[in-house]
Image: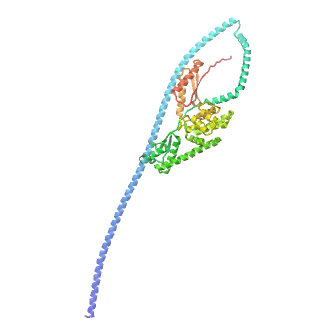
Amino acid sequence: MSPIFVVLIAIAAAVAAFIFGFFWRVTFDRKFRREQEEQLRREAEHILREAKNEAELRKKEALLEAKDEWFKAKTEFEREAAKTRDQIRQEQLRVKEADLEVKKQRDHNSKRESEFAARESFLNSKEKTLRTKDNELSRILAQQNERLEKISQMTQEEAKKILLGNLEGQVRYECAQMIKEMKDQAKADGEKEAKEIIVQSIQRCAADTTVESTVSVVHLPNDEMKGRIIGREGRNIRSFEEATGIDVIVDDTPEAVILSGFDPIRREVARLALEKLITDGRIHPGRIEELIKKSEKELDKIMKEAAEEVIFELDVHGLRPKLVEMLGRLKYRTSYGQNVLQHSKEVAIIAGLMATELGLDPKVAVRAGLLHDIGKSIDRETEGTHSELGAELASKNGENDIICNAIAAHHEDVPPISMYPILIQAADTISSTRPGVRRETLTNYVNRLNNLEDIADSFRGVQKAYVIQAGREIRVMVEPEMINDAQAQELAGQISQKIQDEMEYPGQIKVTIIREIRFTEFAK
């Protein structure tokens, strides 16, 4: 084979290989591009599907957020609407009460006007009758004077001079003798009488009434907390009530629950424990028992510190720990809204001041005044009066007979053996009845004063009635021509009896009848 032929064959083979390679390359590139395009298409579809899914998810989230905002706005609107409705309802009640009060006052004024008109008519007729009788009496007196002058052969002036001359010496002697006897008697009994007069005067303002506060209100951060306090199927609230002995009242009152119980110490423990539970947020039976025990220890410390503070202020020494503990319990005992521990402190101060003025030992009076109501710390747990229990408690803890008798006799349950029980009784009534110490609404107070005056004015012969001493005394002015001295005493009893039958009031009301006669002459 010739070299040229071999070269041609090689060239042909190379051309064939090039052509084959070119076509293979073109075919491969087309296949690769188709595969790449297919992969890109699939990736694009995948991205599109993910974009659609993400868009759907964001759409749903936006809808949920919108629903939440709408629900919150609706809840807030309903709360505000309920609050507004309550305010409107309360305002309507106040308006109704004001209308009733105005109507009642109008009826009362009409009744008073009718009574005044009838009384004026009666007084006019009475005045005419009295004027006629007065003229007749003057005529009869003139006739009798003329007869006496004829019989005695003396004028009226001459008879007066003789009679006055005879009486003057006798009256001077009797007056001098009476003055001497009164001075001697005053010197003999002066100190004793002065002490008894002071004590009796102070005792006249006594008023014995008591009312106990039995509920406490605990405020909540929101109304959802009520459900957590109740717990699943009521297990939390049952555990709380069993551990404290206090009823938990969950009603429609917004953001508040009420603790109700007769024992103020347990009620205060329950209040402290519930406030701690609300602050802590973990409300379950185990946590409830733990915080109740913690609150009991905290309250014991608070009561002890309060008692020690009062004892330090009054400078009382030597009280045994048991008495200090019982005094601390009085911090949560009330009488008509008056704190008994504060009341005991006031009684101690007043009794000490009066003892100093009367020449008695003020330290004994202060000590007896501080301990006089100590029995109220246990009178709900033990049978007997608080004065009896207090005297027994003081005796067991080393107090002497004077102090124990002052505690037992300050309500006259037992006879006093010294002046100190009387001082404690007087100081007790002063502290209990001073203005503003007892709870009473202004409306009830004004109505009580008006009712007292109406009762007095309803009796025949009453000219005017005045209520004084914050409603503890009523003074009645009567017509002297219609009511004599005996009838005045009877009228006082009738008015006091009617007040007892028709009214409710603390303490006692003193009824004083005033009958005044005036004689007037003119010098010409």
Residue appearing at x 27%, y 86% in the figure: 13
User: Residue 40's quadrant in the figure?
Assistant: bottom left
Residue 377 image point, x, y percent: 56, 39
| Residue 62 shown left or right of residue 302 in the figure | left
Rendered location of residue 350, percent (x, y): 64, 36
Q: Is residue 179 left or right of residue 136?
A: right
User: Residue 15 sits in which quadrant?
Assistant: bottom left
**Depth check, front residue: 498 or 56:** 498
Is the residue 370 above or below the residue 520 in the image?
Answer: below
**Observer-nearest of 328 and 75:** 328
Q: How many marks?
A: 0
In this orientation, does residue 110 appear?
Answer: yes
Q: Quadrant of the N terminus?
A: bottom left
* Color style of the picture: rainbow
Q: Of 498 and 412, which appears nearest the observer?
A: 412
Give whichever of 446, 272 is nearer the camera.
272
Residue 330 in the image: state x and y as whole percent.
57, 40
Tell me which residue sits at (54%, 24%) in the image. 497
Q: Position of residue 512 (x, y in %)?
A: 59, 24
Furthest toward the bottom, the residue is: 2
Quadrant holding the C terminus: top right
Residue 373 can be seen, yes or no:
no
In the displayed structure image, the side of residue 489 where residue 70 appears, left or right: left
